[in-house]
Amino acid sequence: MKLDQLAPHELSEFAEFLERQCGIVLSEQKGYLVYSRLGPLVRQENLTSISELLQIAYKGSSAQLREKVVDAMTTNETLWFRDKYPFEILSKTLLTKLASVNRKVRIWSAACSSGQEPYSIAMCIQEFKRSHPRAFPYGIEIVATDISTEMLKRAKTGKFDSISISRGLADERKNRFFKAVDNNHMQLDHEIVSMVHFKPQNLLNSYSGLGRFDVVFCRNVLIYFSLSNKRKILQQIAACLQNHGALFLGASESIAELNQLFSLERNNPGIFYIKKSN
Ligand SMILES: C[S@@+](CC[C@H](N)C(=O)[O-])C[C@H]1O[C@@H](n2cnc3c(N)ncnc32)[C@H](O)[C@@H]1O
């Protein structure tokens, strides 16, 4: 066995650990991910093998290393206005409905990665407010959470490299909302950055500190979870949505037969879910 490989029992111990920590199910076919993602961490931590890395991470006293291991195993792939339709529905339907409610409107991006999703939401809101200056008389708040403190740190800066800028952002928005910092980076407008409150939140834990929301984006994260964790998370999301609040999942995700909690809403060009009233 090579130094950077794990014995089968170590691999299944790691799969159990990973699912307990963050919900991600490591299927047998994805074993290669362990080597490609933890190998660099072994070198960064000056250790000799993945096995040694994991033995240290499992210890109660190694919270920081445990976090790095989980971070390395999460997929942070994201882009601006991903799939387009959720943002069109938000701009054309949901914001119009919410514009005159007599309380603060709240939107949650529940696995926000490096921030493209919540910032795309913020751009939609700013564009909407431009044509509806009296909208949201009690304010509108975007809360963006992720399990990865590394991703949250990066997202909060509002600074993006040219590769991420080129993914999903129309030139018009790029010119309106970004300024070049150097040859390879752009800074998002301060007003947009300040509309988003970033916080750490593991979707497997309680959401009691988050409050209630009118719209939740929980996209391209449940796809990595078991059916039972997915159900638990969707039940918790339903509990913190306002009656008739809206939920967007990723384009390839569904509500895991929780039809008693949500109804499917077809709104050309896409679908979303509405929380049924209690
Ligand atoms: C593929 S990205 C999706 C980003 C964005 N929602 C989108 O659709 O473009 C998945 C994100 O889920 C986060 N994640 C994974 N497990 C999580 C958990 N248990 N709780 C919260 N976030 C988690 C990862 O850190 C990662 O940033």
Image: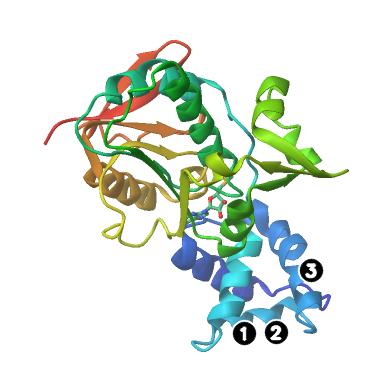
Give the labeled residue for mark 2. 52
Q: Residue furthest top?
A: 268
Give the labeled residue for mark 1. 55
Which residue is at a point 49% across and 35% down the rendered structure image?
Answer: 122
Residue type at tag 2: Glu
Give the labeled residue for mark 3. 40
Question: In which quarter of the view is residue 205 placed?
Answer: bottom left
Is the residue 270 above or below the residue 61 in the image?
Answer: above
Determine the secondary structure under disc 2: helix
Q: Is residue 168 visible?
A: no
Residue type at tag 3: Pro
Give the mark nearer the N terminus: 3 vs 1: 3
Which mark is nearer the camera, 2 or 3?
3
Give the mark nearer the N terminus: 2 vs 3: 3
Q: Position of residue 218 (x, y in %)?
A: 43, 41
* Front-lying residue, 74 or 79: 79
Relative side of 215 to 76, left or right: left
Q: Is residue 233 visible?
A: yes
Q: Position of residue 271 (x, y in %)?
A: 41, 20
